[in-house]
Image (cartoon, grey):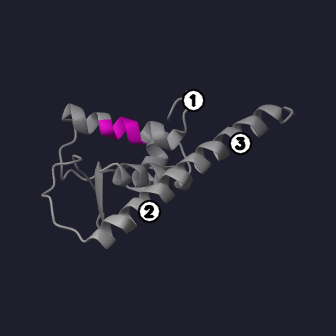
Amino acid sequence: MADFTGRAAYLQIADEFKQKIHDGELTPGDKLPSESELMTLHNVSRTVARQAISRLREDGYAISHQGKGSFAAMPGKSAATKRSPEFEQITEHLSEVRRDLRRLADRMDQLEDLVRRQTPKR
């Protein structure tokens, strides 16, 4: 289970896998745990497991294939390809949207934590 550090659980899980990739415990191409496996391993909800995998993909540490799962990757190690200016513009816009969504998710985590602390124990 991800320990409470004040940092969102999905970020803790993603950081754990990034560290394993950097340390060589996982090499590019190794299969990552499924959402269900992450739920069991870390005692988290499907949403948290999905966010962790999504974060790994966004940061370049995972590649997902529909129906096959997610696999470890190392950012910046894939072959560079020529992309159109439109593609680059769309990619930048998507990055901004993802940053906004991460900020919103962090704020939601803070609000949920505040509500948990304010809820009287029975």
Disc 3 target residue: 112
31 magenta-colored: no
Q: Mark 1 touching mark 2, by CB under 8 A?
A: no
Q: Is residue 95 left or right of residue 77?
A: right
17 magenta-colored: yes
Q: Amino acid at mark 2?
A: His
Q: Position of residue 61 (x, y in %)?
A: 29, 48
- State how far apart marks 3 and 1 are (Cα): 13 Å
Q: Which residues are magenta?
A: 14-18
SS label for mark 1: loop
Of residues 12 and 88, the one drawn nearer to the viewer in this rendering: 88
Q: Mark 3 touching mark 1, by CB under 8 A?
A: no
Name the residue: 75% across, 35% down: 114
Q: Is residue 68 left or right of residue 24?
A: right
Q: Is residue 72 left or right of residue 1?
A: left
Q: Amino acid at mark 1?
A: Phe
Disc 1 target residue: 4
Q: Sequence-wise, which precedes: disc 3 or disc 1?
A: 1
Q: Sequence-wise, which precedes: disc 3 or disc 2?
A: 2
Of residues 118 and 94, the one drawn nearer to the viewer in this rendering: 94
- Tell me, for residue 93, which label it has, or none: 2
Of residues 31 and 122, the one drawn nearer to the viewer in this rendering: 31
Name the residue: 39% across, 68% down: 90
Residue 112 placement: quadrant: top right
Q: Which tag is nearer the camera, tag 1 or tag 2? A: 2
